[in-house]
Image (cartoon, grey):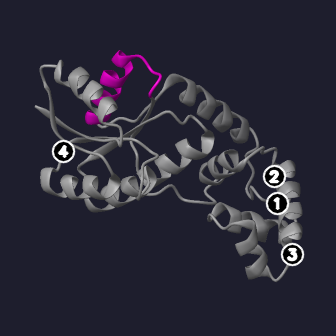
Amino acid sequence: MLTIMLIDDHPVVRRGIRALLEAEPDFQVVGEAGDGYEGIRMVERLRPRILLLDLTMKGISGIEVTRQVSKSYPSTAIIIFSVHSGDHYVLEALRAGARGYILKESPSGELIQAIREVADGHRYLSASILDRTIDIVVRVGDTDTLDPLSPLTAREREVLKLSIQGNTSAEIAEQLYVSRRTVETQRTSAMHKLGLKNQYELITYAIQKGILAAEPSN
C-alpha cells in the first residue's frame, strides 16, 4: 500500500484530493494537515511514502516544509501541488528537495501518474514546467567552456556568485561595500554576457556548469 499525506490549508481542496486518491486501490491517505507546522509533526509520526504539499500557506511556507522534511525524513518523497507555475517557485521547490511539481490545473490522471512516478524513485514535473526547464538547459548547455564565467569581469563574477548563493542586492552591496545600484548594474551586465534572462536561468546555469552543486537527495 502506498501511503500518502496531504498538506493544504483549504479543507475543500484536501477533501477533493483525498477522494481522488482513495479511489486508487493501492493508495492510502494516512493523514492531512492544514498548515506546515502541523504537517511536519504528522510526517514525523506517520512517515508517509509520499507527501503532497501546497506551497503558500499561513505560517511556515511549503518551501520550508520541503526543506525540513527532505533533510529529516528522506524516505518521504515530496510532490508540490500548487497553483503557482512561476520559475522561481519551481526552482526553489526542487532545490529544497521536492521530487515532483504538479500544477493544480493539471488533469486528475496526471496527479495519479506523478505520485506513481515519484514513488518509483523518479522525478515528475507538469508538462508545461518540464518543457520550459528543458528549453533553459538546452540554451545554457550550448555555451560550454572550461571557465563558464570567463566573459565576466572580476566584480561581475563576485556579484553573480553571491546572487547564485541567494543573497539580495542589498546584502551583496553590504558585503562588497558598493551601492545597491552598482550591484544591480553588474548583475544585469553579467547575465547579458551569459545570455541569461532571470534568476531561474541563472541558477540552472550555475548547476549545469558546476558553479553551484545541486543539493544531495540524501
Q: Is residue 119 magenta?
A: yes
Q: Give the quadrant of residue 54.
A: top left
Q: Quadrant of the N terminus?
A: top left
Tally the numbered discs. Answer: 4
**In the picture shown, does residue 167 fall above or below 133?**
below
Q: Please identify, in this view, whether the residue under mark 2 or under mark 3 is nearer the observer.
A: 3
Q: Dots 2 and 4: beta carbons under 8 Å?
A: no
Q: Which residue is mark 3?
A: 179
Pick whichever, 101 or 11, lies toward us. Answer: 11
Marks 3 and 1, Cα distance to the nearest angstrom?
13 Å
Q: Is residue 216 visible?
A: no
**Labelled disc at residue 48:** 4
Q: Which residue is mark 2?
A: 191
Q: Which residue is mark 1?
A: 187
Left or right of 48: which side holds 53?
right
Give the mark, 2 or 3, whose residue is nearer the N terminus: 3
Q: Residue at x 66, y 30 (%)?
A: 135
Q: Dots 4 and 1: beta carbons under 8 Å?
A: no
